[in-house]
């Protein structure tokens, strides 16, 4: 059974307000629609960017970067360039406090509608209620696919950029270890500071970057602070970008 975490006071959200919060190491966006509060993962499934500042209309939010659109209630991707849904979370209001489930609402869709993606998964069925494909028991998207080697995994992680320094996390030296077992990736990573406000965003983007790779079923990102990060871990490319010689 999922637990609920207190994330904000109800007074922090006006009639059409929104608030980005951290729920169990995930960035979650609260959006108030009249008397209803909806919660979705604050990460666009297309490019991993925050949805926080995207326009909201008719129960949907639009990614401010490339225009991907998502249903705030189901997480369903409504238009390109997004083809994958975003996670949604149950919300409760008790004594003027907003509580959000620490687990995504179930069932969480695993693929985009055929009308958006342009293809249907042969091993998936469709739920009549949402029109979204659901993986049949025993079906695996990664079956028969060969996962990349360590260098390929690191190249994927280079897509993730520290939003403050604007340098990818591999060249910054934030990745301590990458290991692959079957179709699962385990990553030990750190932050430039234990109080880094972008930590949850960086971790979630790292997970998404790896799980988009062929042959990767899941990625587990573990945050470690020992040994602590230092500028000595940066590559020469990172040093050049920051003007460190």
Image (spheres, helix red, strand yellow):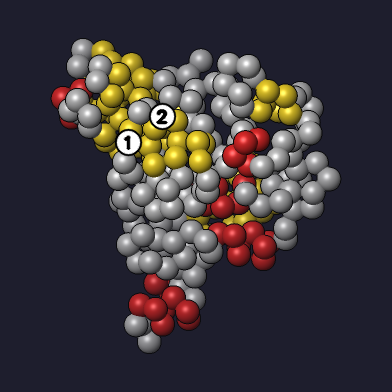
The mark nearer the N terminus, 2 or 1, is: 1
Q: Which residue is mark 2?
A: 72
- Residue 223 in sight: no
Q: Residue at x 66, y 42 (%)?
A: 118
Q: Position of residue 63 (x, y in %)?
A: 40, 46
Q: Position of residue 29 (x, y in %)?
A: 34, 35
Q: Secondary structure at mark 1?
A: strand
Against 16, is 48 above or below? below
Q: Nearer the viewer, residue 9 or 72?
A: 72
- Label 2 crowding class (10 Å Cα cut-off): few <14, some 14-19, many 20+? many
Viewer-nearest of labels 2 and 1? 1
Against 58, is 165 above or below? below
- Label 1 crowding class (10 Å Cα cut-off): few <14, some 14-19, many 20+? some
Q: Which residue is mark 1?
A: 56
Outermost residue on the top side: it is 95
Q: Residue at x 48, y 81 (%)?
A: 236
Image quadrant of residue 232?
bottom left
Against 8, is 196 above or below? below
Q: Residue at x 62, y 56 (%)?
A: 178
Q: Position of residue 96 (x, y in %)?
A: 19, 17
Contact (Cβ within 8 Å) of mark 2 with mark 1: yes
- Residue 157 in sight: yes
Q: If the image is split into quadrants, where does the C terminus sit?
A: bottom left
Q: Residue at x 62, y 47 (%)?
A: 211
Outermost residue on the right side: it is 144
Q: Position of residue 106 (x, y in %)?
A: 54, 21
């Amino acid at each position: 059974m999922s637990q609920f975490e207190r994330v904000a006071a109800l007074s922090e959200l006006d009639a059409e307000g929104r608030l980005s919060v951290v729920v169990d190491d995930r960035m979650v966006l609260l959006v108030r629609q009249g008397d209803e509060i909806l919660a979705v993962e604050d990460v666009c499934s297309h490019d991993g960017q925050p949805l926080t500042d995207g326009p909201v209309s008719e129960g949907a939010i639009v990614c401010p970067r490339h225009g991907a659109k998502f249903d705030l209630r189901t997480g369903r991707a409504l238009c390109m360039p997004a083809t994958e849904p975003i996670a949604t979370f149950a919300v409760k209001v008790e004594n003027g406090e907003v509580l959000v489930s620490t687990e995504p609402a179930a069932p969480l869709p695993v693929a985009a509608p055929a009308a958006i993606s342009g293809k249907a998964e042969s091993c998936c069925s469709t739920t009549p209620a949402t029109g979204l494909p659901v993986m049949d028991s025993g079906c695996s998207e990664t079956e028969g696919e060969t996962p990349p080697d360590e260098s390929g995994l690191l190249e994927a992680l280079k897509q993730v950029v520290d939003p403050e320094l604007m340098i990818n996390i591999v060249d910054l030296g934030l990745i301590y270890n990458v290991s692959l077992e079957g179709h699962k990736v385990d990553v030990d990573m750190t932050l430039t500071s234990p109080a880094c406000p972008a930590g949850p965003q960086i971790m979630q983007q790292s997970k998404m970057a790896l799980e988009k790779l062929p042959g990767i079923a899941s990625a587990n990102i573990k945050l470690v602070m020992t040994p602590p990060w230092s500028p000595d871990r940066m590559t020469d490319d990172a040093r050049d970008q920051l003007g460190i010689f």
